[in-house]
Image (cartoon, rainbow, N blue to C red):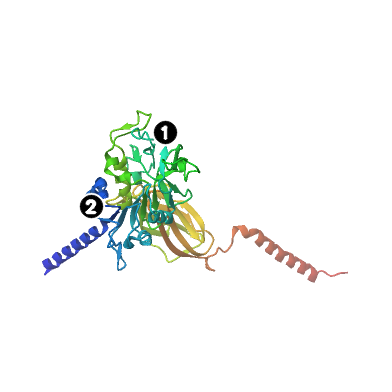
Amino acid sequence: MAIVRVFLVILFVSLTIAIESSKSSKVLVLMQDDAIATSHSMFFNGLKEKGYSLELTTVSNESAQLRVFDEWQYDNLVLFAPAAEFPSGVSVQTILDFIDSGHNVIVAANSEIARDTLELASECNVEFGEEETLVIDHFNYDASDEKEHSLIVAENILDNKVIMGPNGASTPVLFRGVAQDVEEESTLVFPLITSYSTSYSANPSEPITKSPHVAGTKTTLVSALQARNNARVIFSGSLDLFSNKFFTSPMQKSGDKSKKFDKSGNENFAKQVSGWAFDKRGILRATNEKHHLVGETESPAGYRIKDKIHYSVQIEEWNGSKWVPFTADDVQLEFRMLDPYIRTTLKHNGKGLYTAEFIIPDVYGVFTFKIEYIRKGYGFLNTISRIPVRPYRHNEYERFIDAAFPYYASAFSMLAGLWVFSWVFLYNRDK
């Protein structure tokens, strides 16, 4: 019986792991047409090599469903259908609900951009350029494009090791597509690739009669959304950026022989960006949160004003395959009641353990230990724990307070004066 029981436990664990693994690796790829399956096969094969199970379908397939009976059928979504309306099962509202539930999306557009793609981007604070426009730069284009100057050699790639990997992006990326305008003040959306000061958005086949939709360094080529629920969305203005042609194409920046490369950086860029978006690289978690009086080990039910307390928490980072200790010098703890009364930077031991010691302020009520760590590329880390703080009891106050000695002296001097006055008044006769 014991052997059978052990076998059943092993079988149950194996099935659980298999189910979770298959669930977390499902990706729906919605394409403009079947030709994209061939023209972008290197990108799709790269996802398969990472263990993802891809389901490729076109927008004409009305049976495509992201959600069935309120259950999501996929963890990730790739939208390579910029010029088409999405099927009813993958509508804009369904995709927004998909993101709100913590799932990830990669969206690629081009100069032929339909209403659904524009609406989805707008809901995420990204504004694509007008239809039939391209990013044009007469100084930073590839030498093979001597006509339109719309094949941009993009070098302004975000220097972030969490998103772009430890080696970063050492080779420029080829880009031909529509521009994006990203809200500068947004804390959730940020550019991954920006263009140059000489870039602008326009229709290359028509004369320019009005101000471009976006121009200069404000021209964003690829952007990312890091939602508060740690869902991630990539917006690329170029569908060709993920194509086999751009993956394998040599490039040379026009007029600069030092910027000649046998192969573009598109494949590495697509690999790193999809890895960050789908593998959840850079997600943070806080565990083993503790707080207690200095010199003790157990957490009390509450504290007293002016107590000195010790706070500690373990912070870990998901690197794509496992949880590893997270180290940073800018993680702060707030001890707050409506507003922060104490804000202190946590010290770490290099192994993910963060600690702080402080004295509770002379204010009683329900206080909150709060860590809110928001950094580009990392998932949102937000921890909250509450504890009551009480005032001194009547028998816990000091009998005599040093600061009150002048008042004590004045009281006793009044008593002494009263005694002297009474003695003189009672025992002194007028003759």
- Residue at the bottom extreme, as displayed: 426
Q: Is residue 43 above or below residue 389?
A: above
Mark 1 — residue? 139
Identified at 69% across, 61% down, the residue is 410
Q: Which marked residue is nearer to the observer: mark 2 or mark 1?
A: 1
Inter-mark Cα distance, 2 to 1: 41 Å
Residue 252 image position (x, y, % from top left) = 33, 32
Badge 2 crowding class, 10 Å Cα cut-off, few under 14, some 14 to 19, many 20 or more, is: some
Front residue of 366/406: it is: 366
Badge 1 crowding class, 10 Å Cα cut-off, few under 14, some 14 to 19, many 20 or more, is: some
Residue 427 image position (x, y, % from top left) = 79, 70
Asked whether residue 331 appears in the rendered view, the answer is: no
Asked whether residue 182 appears in the rendered view, the answer is: yes
Q: Is residue 132 above or below residue 24?
A: above
Q: Which badge, 2 or 1, is on the more N-terminal residue?
A: 2
Q: In the structure shown, which secondary structural element does the residue marked by tag 2 occupy?
A: loop
Judge left or right: residue 424 versus residue 81.
Answer: right
Residue 287 image position (x, y, % from top left) = 35, 57
Mark 2 — residue? 51
Residue 265, quarter of picture: top left
